[in-house]
Structures are given as C-alpha cells and as structure tokens.
Image (cartoon, helix red, strand yellow):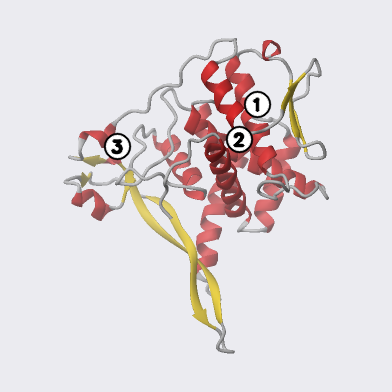
Amino acid sequence: MCQRPLYRAYAHVTDTIIAEIEAGTPPWRKPWTGSASGIALPTRHNGEEYRGINILMLWVMAAKHGYVSSRWMTYKQAQELGGQVRKGETSSTVVKYGTFTRENELGVEEEVPYARAYRVFNADQIEGLPEDCYIRPEAPRDLGTAEDPELEAFFGRIGAEILTSDDPRAYYSPAKDHIHMPPIATFHDAAGYYGTLAHEVIHWTGSEKRLERIKKFANREAYAFEELVAEIGACFLGAQIGVAPEFDQSAAYVEGWLKALKEDKRAIFRAASEAQKAADFVLHAAGQSKEVAA
C-alpha cells in the first residue's frame, strides 16, 4: 500500500531528525555547536523568516553543507531575483503545512490537515542574486561575566517572576509559577546564565495562565516532550535575541525524544510548533514581536 503524501512528508522530516539525534547532534543544536559565524533564523527569498519545523530542517542542511547565508528560495524564485542555481547543486526539503476545508460524507464542513514538501536552495548555491542575499550573520557579542543591561531589560519586560538564591538549581515551578535562577556569578559566563534563563522562560510560557501547555507532568513521556519543546524554543528565542542556549546532555532526555519520534511521525512537528508559539509569546511579551508570514 502506498503511503499518503501527508504521512510521507511527516515521515521524511522525522526520519531526518532522528538520524541527526542518533548521530549525536539534534538539529536545533546544530547552528550553536558547529558554526563560527553568527546565528540567524533561515529566511525566504523575500526576507520573511521560516518558522517551526522548517527552521530545524534548514539548520540541518546549512550545517551539513557549510552554508553561511540564511536566505533560501525555490529554483523559480532564484531566477526571478536574477540568480541561477549552480549546476550540480542539491536542493533541500521544507514543508508547507496547514489545513483546508471540505465537506465530509455527511455534508458537514471539516478542517483537513495537509503537509506538502517542496524544494529550496540556499543563496550560497546560487550565483547572481542581490548582495543582501549573501550577508553573513553577525557573530554573537561577547557578554562577559556580568549582568547585561539589554538582556536584563528584555527578560524584565516579559512579566515572569524570576527569583535568585544560593540554591544551585535553575528551574521553573508550575505550582508557584516562578522561575528560580542561581546567581549569575555561579555561571562560567553571562552567556551561560542567559541561555539557561531562556530555557526556563520557555517552560514558563506553558503555564495554564499563558499557553496552557503544562497542566502537569503526568508521566515521563510528557516530561520528555516538554523538555524537547523547551530546548527547541530556547534555540528559536536565542536566535532572535543573540543568546546561545544551554543544552542538557542527559542521555535520558535523548532516549525519551527518540522514543517519542519513532512512535509518532507527527511528534516533532508538534514540538516545533509549540516551541515556536512559546518563543513568539516571549517576544510579544517583551514588545519585540514581528509580523510573520502564515
């Protein structure tokens, strides 16, 4: 029996991400661990940012092939901009997904999901594009070891209660709805502190008062999924505010992610979608939200 296009699209993306995790570097960690240049969210031919699962897929391909530009486009879009894809270049897969309305057998309108894969090329594979397509992302600034006024102001605007004590643990408490952070001086550098804070802030968005993602950690699978959302969300947020996230190296988390992804080809789509919503929520709360394409 042939697989449906929707399932094939989910399966292709999920299998790609599983392979990256099993190789030792989850795709959301790729740009932070393998790049000497700055980190940027991938953008379309017109400069609009990709979102959700497509960010992960394009970060994978950029790291694999050494692409520096953050601009991606179809063959036709490249031609419309005056460019030409170099002979022999290989395209990368992104997914357009959403819903359409149709009548079911009872005559009732229903929303039907779809996912359609299409092919894009990085600007580094294309000759003759406008100069702004080849701009190299700026390297993240050195935050030193002390508090950063700009980042303090950013996290201060989002409305989260952030407590500090000598307790060495960094965590979000759903029961008390606050974030606890150790003193910044206990971290190797300020980047480590703010990267950890970004992770906990993503957890904070899951409260019933906000995005209603965390009702309770009913089981290990739910906890592993929430950690996956927090890791990816911290990367999406970090790319926007110039902060490298701190990664949990626990084998138990990785095991949990692999189990979830292998059992459900849609799980990584849900995780990336929830991570995107969380990052958007934080940016909006801080007054830095952007108009984005659907």
Q: Nearer the viewer, residue 13 or 269?
A: 269
Work out whether 55 lies above or below 93. above
The count of marks equals: 3
Disc 1 vs disc 2: which is toward the camera? 1
Across and down, in percent, residue 149 comes to 54, 16
Could you classify mark 1 by the number of other residues whose Cα lies within 10 Å: few (under 14), some (14-19), or many (20 or more)?
Answer: many
For the N terminus, which image quadrant? bottom right
- Residue 167 appears at what percent x and percent y? 81, 19
162 sits left or right of 101 in the view: right
| CB within 8 Å, label 3 to label 2 | no
Disc on res. 124: 3
The dot on residue 196 is: 1
Image position, residue 289 (x, y; %): 48, 40
Can you give x and y, in whole percent of width and height, for residue 226 in the image?
Answer: 70, 44
Marks 3 and 1, how far apart at CA: 33 Å
Query: Residue 24 shows which numbered tag?
Result: 2
Label 1 – label 2 distance at C-alpha? 21 Å
Q: Earlier in the sequence, mark 3 or mark 2?
A: 2
